[in-house]
Amino acid sequence: MVYAADEQRYEKIPYRRVSDSGLILPAVSFGLWRNLGDQMPLENSRKVILSAFDNGIFLLIMHRIMGLVMVQRKKLLVQFIVKI
């Protein structure tokens, strides 16, 4: 299945400029360490991440507190889902 992002995704939530860097990020981020992983089937993870994208959330947080192995697994999960 080919993913087509919602055309209106950047109009759904506010965005903030980060200092004077020029970087603009969504006011809301998505914490993968609590929402995805081994306890959730891959298809559910895919739906959740793509729904976040469709709603303008593209800042995915993979906190180091869960350990480097878990961070690497989450990064691979996101890369796999985005390529689907």
Image (cartoon, rainbow, N blue to C red):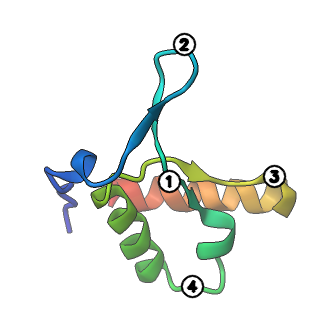
Q: Where, quadrant-wise, is the N terminus in this rendering? A: bottom left
Q: In the drawing, does residue 48 fall left or right of residue 36?
A: left
Disc nearer the start of the sequence (2/4): 2
Name the residue type under label 3. Answer: Arg
Instruction: Measure the alpha-carbon separation of dots 3 and 2.
Output: 26 Å
Quadrant housing residue 10: top left
Q: Where, quadrant-wise, is the C terminus in this rendering? A: bottom left
**Residue found at the far left of this picture:** 7
Disc nearer the start of the sequence (2/1): 2
Name the residue type under label 2. Answer: Asp
The residue that mark 1 highlights is 28
The residue that mark 2 highlights is 20
| Residue 29 location (% of width, % of height) | 53, 54
Which of 52 and 25 lies nearest the eye of the viewer? 25
Give the class, few, some or many, for how many residues have Cα within 10 Å of label 1's Cα (few <14, many ≥20).
Answer: some
Question: Which residue is found at the position 63% from the left and 60% from the top?
Answer: 74
Which dot, 4 or 1, sits closer to the camera? 1
The residue that mark 3 highlights is 64
Question: Which residue is found at the position 44% from the left and 82% from the top?
Answer: 44
| Element on which disc 2 rests | loop
Disc nearer the start of the sequence (3/2): 2
Which of 25 and 46 lies nearest the eye of the viewer? 25
Instruction: Measure the alpha-carbon separation of dots 3 and 4.
Output: 20 Å
Q: Does the rendering let one see residue 32?
A: yes
Name the residue type under label 4. Answer: Met
Quadrant housing residue 37: bottom right
Residue 40 bears which disc, if any?
Answer: 4
| Residue 35 location (% of width, % of height) | 60, 74
